[in-house]
């Protein structure tokens, strides 16, 4: 692979290239990197697209020059058609105000309060989905299990609501269908208006109704209870929804519609990326028994009645395995694009106004210049005494002002589930030692079912 900058000729308006990207965006970007170097430029349908593969350039885009870029308008319209106008789909002063009002709900102090809700969800789902008695074994579809558990976590922490298995299946089906439809719409030349018939429209509206009905019921009920002054000593007053309704600054509060739209985002997007990270982590643990044994020793020696934030911080190998899993299988790979608002130069490459810039997280996380033997699972890369990783080379939650608002929430949730699994179960992959191939469906998912055998340990 060269380190140069290539401008690639794209015949037929770049349509064959667009088809390649749409068919397998991970494989396409890997080919571009291998064939063209650290910067690859194309013209597709009269639009310039630039892939930057180096961490220095990526930090320039997301951090140093973040004011010179914006998110793609058509992408935001697609998400707005599902989630409404929230902290993901707005720009400028509106985004800044919403982000400022929402941030306190995810502070370390609030996280400590959410941990009991998270642990209750974990205990409930593990009790229903996994073997309960020592020596019992069951083969589990890992993606279905992690979806159920992370959905229960987000429902409890967002709304103080525990879901049923039937509700989880119904909502999961709706969100997965909406994710697939969104990926489909990404590659259309135009984003159709809501009133225009288009492929997938009827199913999209049906699944949207399922989600909006669920979210609106919780928001409307809470707004009414607060208006009736019945939330005094209410256990729900510690959840995210209550924090959102109470948040205020010099510009006022979030409107009820903004609360509803942000709940749609936090609910539908908040569990799927965490489920993806946990799915790949469980698969990697099932195929690396030596690491699992070492990790079990660490967790067993540190565990008392429960884990708090300080306890999670004292589990370096657990945290290292989670980071390494997210390096190899970054949950979010589809959203790291920006559009240049003006002409500028990024690491010697001229970027014209309105150019679409792609930040390929998968390829950067697997670049051998920054991660030797990148295809190997090596959690020691992230242990406290490991060599420093170049800034910008590892960013599963993004970087800059628009880094993932729920980063700490997701990290704590994943660590609690991972510690519970390590302490109570032995794992092995039903199909041997090869994990399924990944595919991009907003979150990174296994292309075929990942079946793992869970054997209940005899632990106190």
Image (cartoon, rainbow, N blue to C red):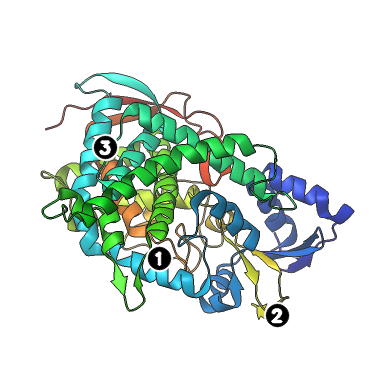
Q: Is residue 457 visible?
A: yes
> Of the numbered discs in the image, which one, if any, rests on residue 387?
1
> Of the numbered discs in the image, which one, if any, rests on residue 343?
2
Of residues 314 and 169, which is closer to you in this image? 169
| Farthest-out residue, front | 228
| Vertical order, 366 against 67 (above or below) | above
| Vertical order, 139 against 205 (above or below) | above
Of residues 295 and 362, which is closer to you in this image? 362
Q: Is residue 414 visible?
A: no
Task: Tell me residue 4's x, y (percent).
Answer: 72, 69
**Which of the two discs, 1 and 3, sits closer to the camera?**
3
N-terminal of the pair, mark 1 or mark 2, is 2
Q: Is residue 407 left or right of residue 438?
A: left
Q: Is residue 58 left or right of residue 42?
A: left
Of residues 109 and 253, which is closer to you in this image? 253
**Which of the two discs, 3 and 2, sits closer to the camera?**
3
Q: Residue at x 70, y 80 (%)?
A: 343
Task: Tell me residue 70's x, y (percent).
Answer: 59, 70
Disc 1 to disc 3: CB gap under 8 Å: no
> Of the numbered discs in the image, which one, if any, rests on residue 162?
3
């Amino acid at each position: 692979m060269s380190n140069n900058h290539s401008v690639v000729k794209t015949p037929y308006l770049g349509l064959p290239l667009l088809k390649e990207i749409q068919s397998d965006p991970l494989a396409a970007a890997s080919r571009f990197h291998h064939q063209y170097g650290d910067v690859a430029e194309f013209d597709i349908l009269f639009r310039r697209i630039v892939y930057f593969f180096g961490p220095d350039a990526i930090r320039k885009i997301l951090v140093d020059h973040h004011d010179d870029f914006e998110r793609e308008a058509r992408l935001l319209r697609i998400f707005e058609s599902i989630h409404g106008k929230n902290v993901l789909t707005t720009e400028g002063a509106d985004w800044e105000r919403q982000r400022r009002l929402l941030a306190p709900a995810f502070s370390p102090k609030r996280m400590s309060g959410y941990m009991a809700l998270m642990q209750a969800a974990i205990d409930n789902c593990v009790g229903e989905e996994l073997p309960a008695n020592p020596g019992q074994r069951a083969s589990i579809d890992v993606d279905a299990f992690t979806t159920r558990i992370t959905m229960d976590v987000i429902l409890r922490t967002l709304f103080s609501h525990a879901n049923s298995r039937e509700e989880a299946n119904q909502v999961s089906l709706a969100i997965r269908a909406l994710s697939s439809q969104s990926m489909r719409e990404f590659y259309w030349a135009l984003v159709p208006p809501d009133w225009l018939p288009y492929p997938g429209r009827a199913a999209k509206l049906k699944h949207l109704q399922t989600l909006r009905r669920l979210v609106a019921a919780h928001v409307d009920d809470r707004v009414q209870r607060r208006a009736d002054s019945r939330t005094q000593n209410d256990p729900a007053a510690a959840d995210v929804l209550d924090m959102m309704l109470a948040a205020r600054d010099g510009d006022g509060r979030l409107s009820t519609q903004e609360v509803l739209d942000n709940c749609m985002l936090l609910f539908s997007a908040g569990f799927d990326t965490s489920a993806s990270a946990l799915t790949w982590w469980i698969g990697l643990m099932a195929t690396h028994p030596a690491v699992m044994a070492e990790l079990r020793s660490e967790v067993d020696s540190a565990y008392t009645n429960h884990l708090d934030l300080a306890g999670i911080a004292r589990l370096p190998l657990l945290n290292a395995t989670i980071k390494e899993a997210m390096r190899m299988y970054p949950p979010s790979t589809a959203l790291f694009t920006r559009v240049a608002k003006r002409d500028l130069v990024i690491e010697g490459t001229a970027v014209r106004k309105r150019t679409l810039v792609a930040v390929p997280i998968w390829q950067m996380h697997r670049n051998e210049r920054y991660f030797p033997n990148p295809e190997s699972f090596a959690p020691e890369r992230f242990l406290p005494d490991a060599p420093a990783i170049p800034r910008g080379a590892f960013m599963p939650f993004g970087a800059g002002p628009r880094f993932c608002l729920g980063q700490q929430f997701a990290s704590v949730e994943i660590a609690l589930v991972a510690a519970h699994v390590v302490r109570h179960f032995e794992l092995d992959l039903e199909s041997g030692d090869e994990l399924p191939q990944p595919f991009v469906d907003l979150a990174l998912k296994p292309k075929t079912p990942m079946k793992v055998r869970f054997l209940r340990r005899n632990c106190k």
